[in-house]
Amino acid sequence: MSIMLTDTKLEAIAEKVHNQVRLSMEDGLYLFESPDLLGIAQLANQVNIKKNGQSVYFIENMYINPTNVCEANCGFCGFKRKPGQEGAYTMDEAALLEYVEQRWNDNIREFHIVGGHNNELPFDYYLDTIRTLKKHYPHVTVKAYTGAEIEFFSRISGLTMKEVLEELMKAGLDTLPGGGAEILTERYRAKMSPEKASTDQWLEAHEIAHGLGLQTHATMLYGSIESMEERLIHMDRLRQLQDRTNGFMVFIPLAMQPRSVKAGLKRRTSAFDDMRTLAISRLMLDNFDHIKAYWINIGVQLTQMALTFGSSDIHGTLIEERISHSVGALTSQGITREELIYLIKSAGKTPVERDTFYNVIKEY
């Protein structure tokens, strides 16, 4: 596949990509600076086609947030509430089952569960949430609790993170979502999520999970106070862990949403930044099979564009996403299977319905 570069400085990077030589931090920094966005897109597209051909994956899944009560004070969150605050909620078993039943369809293959760090609840509550879902929907994969939540459970239970994960797996946990990573540098975490797991703790939670046989997900929340170098440090830390464990299935860059729907457009990431970040992710994370374009945060049209910028996955139906929408995401809270298939087909790609672990259910 021939590539047209208007920036001759990209030629050395293109040579590395062609020869499957790992890109350095310096390469990554230049990719963020280069004016040739379409050249970078072509490189990322070439890497993705080598890994995935024309296939683009999606899943029918349901998003569940059992509680929005949280001890943490993250600078980017509009979802959390303090105990007793207006709008605070915690689902009991009946409310959880009613929530699922009202939104259920027989194609759903995954429950995606994240919530607040509610320290008024015992660890057993979080175990029981999984047990309840597995009892009533035994065939549905449970993707639950971020690396930050695993560290939080360790603190409230007195168990090690390994013991926490073992108990969750006994209850029916199948995989961890990628959230809670934000940006994996301590400068960022001290400012934006000081009460949550440190960089090392988040990485350790996933490394332990991989060691126990779980395959997991990884995210990056970009577009606030982080530098381009910090984005690359984040990718490099994931890349190093993946070298050791090969336990990550996919990387999901998440565009920061403004704190309010009324916030000025200048507070959102630009389309150029979204596309560049996706493409650079594909080029830097050479040991990841998939880069996901998250339509909730960047919208369906940019998600479609992302399919030629290195992305091989557009996530899923979600049914009712709450966390990004609580801080001003402008997209709908769910999408139909038909819309996802149309999105992929009209980009000239092949829609592939998958399960959580990228096993093919059906090609369209």
Image (cartoon, rainbow, N blue to C red):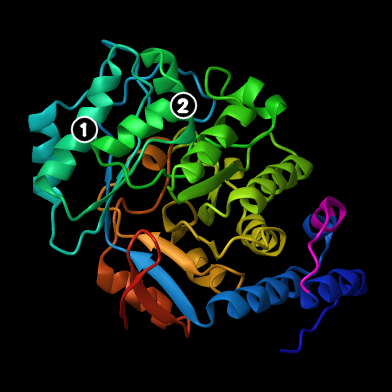
The residue carrying mark 2 is 161
Asked if residue 153 is among those painted magenta in the image, a careful observer would answer: no
User: Magenta segment range?
Assistant: 20-29
Label 2: which secondary element: helix
Q: Amino acid at mark 1?
A: Thr
Q: Is residue 292 left or right of residue 243?
A: left
Of the 4 image quadrants, the one containing the N terminus is bottom right
Q: Is residue 3 above or below residue 116?
A: below
Q: Which residue is found at the position 59% from the left and 79% from the top? A: 49
Q: Residue at x 49, y 18 (%)?
A: 73
Is 136 on the left-hand or right-hand side of 124? left
Number of other residues with Cα within 10 Å of mark 1, as a class: few under 14, some 14 to 19, many 20 or more: many
Q: Position of residue 180 (x, y in %)?
A: 50, 34
CA distance separating discs 2 and 1: 19 Å
User: Which amino acid lies under the numbered mark 2 shown in the image of this protein?
Assistant: Met
Residue that badge 1 annotates: 129
Residue at left offset 63%, top offset 26%? 189
Q: Is residue 232 above or below residue 20?
A: above
Q: Residue 13 in the image: x percent, y percent? A: 85, 69
Along the line of sight, which residue is nearer the eye, 214 or 328? 214
Camera-side residue: 318 or 36?
318
* Disc assigned to residue 2: none
Along the line of sight, the residue nearer the viewer: 150 or 105: 150
Q: Is residue 28 magenta?
A: yes
